[in-house]
Amino acid sequence: MTTAVLEIEGLDVRLSEGRAARPILDGVSLRVAAGETVGLVGESGSGKSVACRSVLGLLPGGAAASGEVRVGGRDVLAMDRAELARTRARQVAMVYQDPRASVNPLRRVGDFLTEGLRATGASAAAARQRALELLESVGIRDPEGALRRYPHQFSGGMLQRVVIAAALAGEPELLVADEPTTALDVTTQAEVIAILTRLKDERGTGLLFVTHDLELAAAICDRVYVMYAGRIVETAATGELFDTPRHPYTAGLLASTPRIEAGAPPPRPIPGRPVPLSEAPPGCAFAARCAYAQERCTRESPVLEAHGGALVACHRADEGITL
């Protein structure tokens, strides 16, 4: 089996009593191997962003976490501040949804890129040369000029390339991308995805790709985890997940995705609303929105179990789901 660069086992994240009725994350487990792209999908509020930020030890204020988040075999949740800083600098990096939130608007891009490199002991000249190489690798045509410009002088797509370059500066084993294309137009989205995929293949970096776009996940991911109300409800290889979804929520997400093929049916939205943190329904959290729900589903919370080549948390996973 390929070496894992990320292993999350039984991760629970809970807010203090009175702030939420259920955990933000409830027993989440996932794995990313070197050179693998793993998708994490689900509606807004499902816990995707909290799960991926936990990899950097970035948890909500006042939250209590249990379980393990291992990067390169070491548990991030057990690290002291100095060890966590080294992990962020050398082993794992993150690309956020909004590139403008990742940079200081008052500092030149060259300062942004070389600051981390110089903190590791590189000379000013070596850090500048490395920054030029990184900008060229992500498709910035004038890297010399880019170093002198400020963030507001870049388009959203160009600035996202700069942020990707900064994330790659420490040669990380794992790259976490939290919906990195959401704020971009379709053409720029494709360019950014092509950059991430190429760099991942060239460097053997593991990529955890968080998205609400199932078509995008199908195009770039080797495996996909589906989240609902803080839990993983299904995971499988991408082809199997999209061809034969076993959880009604996965099937609902696929059925609600617009398609451009001739004769394709119109999208069908999932009825109801996602479960907010202020509610903790008994049984399966998806039962109130599920056309397949039975009385048992409202009483017993299903566990994640093997069904074929997938892991599914559904009492009726073997019965077949119709899109």
Image (cartoon, grey):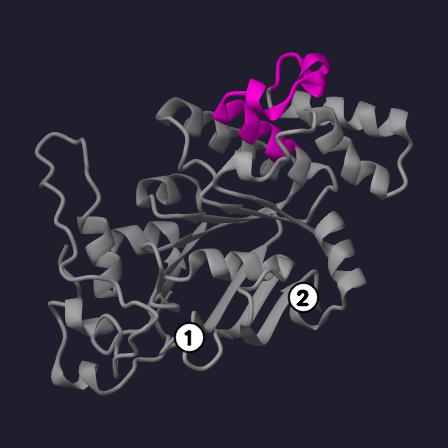
Residue 300 lies in magenta, yes or no? no
Q: Residues within 10 Å of mark 2 (few under 14, many from 20)?
A: many
Where is residue 185 shown, x and y percent of the image? 37, 26
Tell me: 263 left or right of 55: left
Residue drawn at (59%, 20%) of the image:
139
From what the image shows, is residue 137 above or below residue 210? above
Q: Give the quarter of the image for residue 283.
A: bottom left
Q: Position of residue 313 (x, y in %)?
A: 32, 73
Kind of residue at badge 1: Arg
User: What is the x, y in percent for residue 66?
Assistant: 57, 78
Please name the residue shown 29% across and 51% down the image: 242
- Report the magenta residues as a range: 140-165
**Residue at screen point 78% across, 32% down:** 114
Q: Nearer the viewer, residue 104 or 284?
A: 104
**Label 1 vs 2, first from the N-terminus:** 1
Query: Circle 2 sits on which residue?
Result: 76
Where is 189 relative to 220, above or below? above
Question: In the rendered structure, which amino acid carries the disc numbered 2?
Answer: Val
Horizontal side of 289 relative to 215 (left or right) equals: left
Instruction: Please tell me whether the stretch drawn in magenta is mainly helix, strand or loop.
Output: helix
Residue that label 1 marks:
19
Q: Is residue 72 visible?
A: yes
Labels 1, 2: front one? 1
**Would you say 200 lies left or right of 250 here?**
right
Label 1, label 2: how far apart the Cα atoms are: 25 Å
